[in-house]
Image: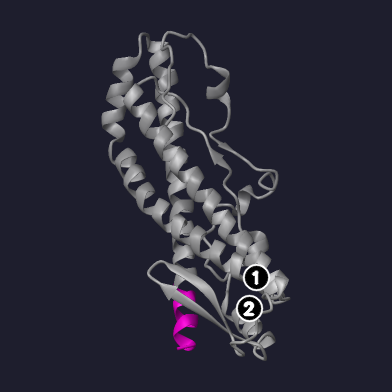
Amino acid sequence: MLRFLCCCFSSGDSADERQPLLHPGPSDLNEAGSARQSRSAHSDVQTVKRIGRLVMRRVCVPELDQRFSDMAETFNEQHERYEAMVRNIRNLRQSYSCNHNDTLALTECVGMIRDEHEAKYRVSLQIKGYEFSLNVVRVDESDEEPLPPHLQFAQNEVKGISASAKATISKGTTLQELIGWLLRSKDQMAEQVKGAAATYQEHGRLSENLEENLKEVRRAKEFALGYRQRAGEVFTEAAQIAGAYL
């Protein structure tokens, strides 16, 4: 983890402290109005909003700077895994032309894969704990031909969906603890920041940084909960599909 080194005797804001805490990605700039809306796992894939990388301002209290840094790093990791899950689902749906309604749903696509290959393969979704996979069994056990490339591709994408959904949920659990502590400790942190400031001007600057950090923590909380919920819905649907094939 990155540990901050900062001098608390500066008379003005540093360049990095003046930068926005949530750096938008290329597709974010025109999406601010709707970026806070929570979406279900069956929402439009093309309009899933990106929060961008979370970058926290320094408050010049090493313990607090580290806590904010840990939270931001964990959120960024969760964000990346969630986006990977969405990409894998989109790739799977596009490869079998089942993406006409652009959702994160898997049921239709797994059914189409199963139907397309039923003459030579028995295809099913299997789930074990927090992992699921696309299982393929040859109808003719003596058939030694390699699997069709697009069927192998589908297996790899399902594996990616499972891994990314699992990581999204795991990071969400850790984030809940990190964010919870930060939001509960607002008054305590304000006192620590006050004690770290050498001048009245410095106190004002660091207090503003703290408030901005907490504002972004609250925003990150909304997104983190949404990511975790949608990843959970993907697992729920996978379990339902697996149960239907038993």
| Residue visible at 69% across and 48% down in the picture | 27
Provide the residue designation for mark 1.
152
- Magenta span: predominant SS is helix
| Residue visible at 57% across and 68% down in the picture | 158
Residue 85 tag number: none
Q: Which of marks 2 and 1 is nearer the N terminus?
A: 2
Q: What stretch is highlighted in magenta?
A: 236-246
Q: Nearer the viewer, residue 28 or 151?
A: 151
Q: Which of 220 and 133 is in front in this view?
A: 133
Quadrant of residue 193 in the image? top left
Q: What residue type is labelled 1?
A: Gln
Q: Which of 53 and 124 is in front in this view?
A: 124
Label 2 element class: helix
Task: Tell me, yes or no, if residue 219 can be seen here.
Answer: no
Mark 1 burial class by Cα count in 10 Å: few <14, some 14-19, many 20+: few
Provide the residue designation for mark 2.
109
Above/below status of 36 relative to 208: below
User: Residue 139 at x, y = what percent?
Assistant: 60, 90
Which image quadrant: the C terminus? bottom left
Which image quadrant: the N terminus? top left
Q: What residue type is labelled 2?
A: Cys
Quadrant of residue 179 in the image? top left
User: Residue 62 at x, y = what percent?
Assistant: 35, 22
Task: Tell me, yes or no, if residue 26 can be seen here.
Answer: yes
